[in-house]
Image (tube, rainbow, N blue to C red):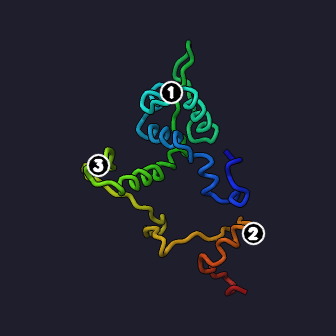
Amino acid sequence: MAGKIRLEDRECPLSATLGVVGEWWTLLILHDAFDGYTRFEQFQENLKISSSILTSRLRALTGNGLLERRRYQTHPDRHEYVLTELGRSLRPVIVTLAAWGNSRLRPEQRSMILVDQETGAEVEPVVVDRSTGRELDPENFVFAAGPAAGEVMRTRYADAAPQQSTPDGGR
């Protein structure tokens, strides 16, 4: 997938992430994995996906460390696909994408909603800063060049965020 990334985006984490999970079937397979599916036949039956495409996507997901392939039967060998810690870390992304999709629909048009397991009440996810709990709205939070940024990234975000103060007062 790296070939699909434009040269100027090679250091962009969004481009790199889309190279791993930006394909239609990949996100749907991950969604099924979050719902407890682990076996090839389960994914195939639920998604109505061809075996060749599913094989390719599962191979990519295991190769990128999002799923782990484990044997659950011998004679014949059968394997299941289990989310890794890295794969589980994508759940907030999947939840947020689904919520965004639902936000475009009237409540009666929604076929799947996120609910509090204890109360059954529908919930609306938001993305927040872990340390402050503040919602990551575009008015207060912007992208800025990071410490490993190259010239293209530094130029793109030159005016994006105030400079952090340094211990020597910026000298």
Up-down relation of residue 133 to residue 6 (above or below)? below
Gap between marks 3 and 1, in whole Å?
Answer: 30 Å
Circle 2: element type: helix
Gap between marks 1 and 2, in whole Å?
Answer: 44 Å
Task: Answer with the quarter of the image where residue 23 lies.
Answer: top right
Work out whether mark 3 precedes mark 1 in sequence or the reverse, and give the earlier one. Answer: 1
Task: Answer with the quarter of the image where residue 31 lies.
Answer: top left
114 vs 66, left or right, is left
Residue type (three-letter) at the residue carrying disc 1: Phe
Q: Residue at x 66, y 81 (%)?
A: 166
Circle 1: element type: helix
Task: Answer with the quarter of the image where residue 105 lies.
Answer: bottom left
The quadrant of the image that shows the N terminus is top right
Q: Which residue is mark 3?
A: 109
Q: Residues within 10 Å of mark 2 (few under 14, many from 20)?
A: few
Q: Which residue is mark 2?
A: 151
Circle 3: element type: helix
